[in-house]
Image: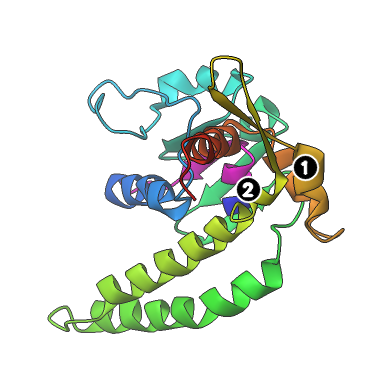
C-alpha cells in the first residue's frame, strides 16, 4: 500500500464503518512524511474541509479520472477493478491489500524487519483493549515508534540528494541547483532501481527534492 501511495497510484480504501474508514484514509498523511500527497482529493459534500475525503456511491464515476487519488468508500462495487489499471484496494475489515503490479520498496526486507515487532505489539495491545476497555495500553507510544521508523526510512531514500546535485551560479549571482536523476537512481542497488526510477518522476518526490535543492542553493546543508 505504501508503495502505491508513494508512486501516486489510485488508492481506494473500503470499510463500511465511517469512523474506521476516515481513520484509515487519514493515517496515510503521517505515514508518508516527509513527503506530502500532492494529487487529487475527491470532495465529500458534508466534509469538504477534510484533507482526504470519503467518496459517496453516487460519485464513483470520479474513479475514472486518469490521475492519482486516495479515496474512501463504504462498500466495494463489482466494477471497481474495471475503473482503473493502477488501482490499489485496501479492505480495512479484512486487513487485505490488493495492488496492481508495483516494484518493491527499496530495502523492503530491512523495513519489514524493523516494523514487524512494532506491528506485533500494536496487535497485542489492540486485542487486550478490546477485552478490557478500561485497560490503558501503550498504543500512542507504539504508533509514534511506527511512524518514526517509517519517517527515518523515507528520509533515507532522499538523504543523499546533495551528492547527485549540481549547482551553477548565474550572471546575477543566483544559484540554480539541478538533480542528476540518472546518477541518483544508479546510487541504489539494481534490485531497488525499478522503484526509484518511477519514484523520482512523482510529484511527491519532485516537491520534496525541489525544496531540498533550494536549501542547497541558499547554503544550508
Which of the 4 image quarters holds residue 159?
A: bottom right
Which of the 4 image quarters holds residue 170?
A: top right
Q: Which mark is residue 162?
A: 2
Residue interval drawn in magenta: 4-17
Q: Residues within 10 Å of mark 1 (few under 14, many from 20)?
A: some
Front-most of 147 and 186? Answer: 186
| Residue at 51 percent of width and 60 percent of height | 94
Task: Locate residue 15, reporting x and y percent.
Answer: 42, 48
Task: Locate residue 200, reporting x and y percent.
Answer: 69, 39
Task: Locate residue 112, reporting x and y percent.
Answer: 61, 73
Front-most of 1 and 174? Answer: 174
- Is residue 102 at all visible to an observer of this figure? no
**Outermost residue toward the top in this view:** 172
**Outermost residue toward the right in this view:** 190
Front-most of 195 and 97? Answer: 195
The residue labelled by disc 1 is 197
Amino acid at each position: 500500500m505504501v508503495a502505491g501511495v508513494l508512486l501516486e497510484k489510485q488508492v481506494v480504501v473500503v470499510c463500511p464503518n465511517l469512523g474506521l474508514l476516515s481513520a484509515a484514509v487519514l493515517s496515510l498523511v503521517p505515514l508518508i512524511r516527509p513527503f506530502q500527497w500532492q494529487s487529487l482529493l475527491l470532495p465529500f459534500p458534508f466534509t469538504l474541509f477534510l484533507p482526504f475525503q470519503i467518496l459517496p456511491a453516487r460519485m464513483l464515476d470520479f474513479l475514472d479520472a486518469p490521475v492519482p487519488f486516495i479515496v474512501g468508500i463504504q462498500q466495494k462495487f463489482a466494477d471497481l477493478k474495471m475503473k482503473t489499471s493502477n488501482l490499489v484496494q485496501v479492505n480495512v475489515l479484512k486487513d487485505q491489500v490488493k495492488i496492481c503490479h508495483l516494484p518493491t520498496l527499496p530495502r523492503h526486507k530491512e523495513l519489514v524487519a524493523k516494523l514487524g515487532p512494532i506491528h506485533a505489539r500494536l496487535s497485542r495491545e489492540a486485542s487486550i483493549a478490546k477485552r478490557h476497555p478500561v485497560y490503558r495500553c501503550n498504543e500512542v507510544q507504539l504508533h509514534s515508534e511506527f511512524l518514526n521508523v517509517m519517517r527515518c526510512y523515507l528520509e533515507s531514500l532522499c538523504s543523499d540528494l546533495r551528492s547527485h546535485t549540481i549547482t551553477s551560479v548565474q550572471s546575477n549571482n543566483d544559484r540554480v541547483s539541478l538533480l542528476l536523476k540518472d546518477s541518483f537512481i544508479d546510487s541504489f542497488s539494481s534490485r531497488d532501481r525499478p522503484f526509484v526510477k518511477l519514484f523520482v518522476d512523482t510529484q511527491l518526490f519532485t516537491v520534496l527534492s525541489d525544496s531540498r535543492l533550494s536549501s542547497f542553493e541558499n547554503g544550508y546543508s
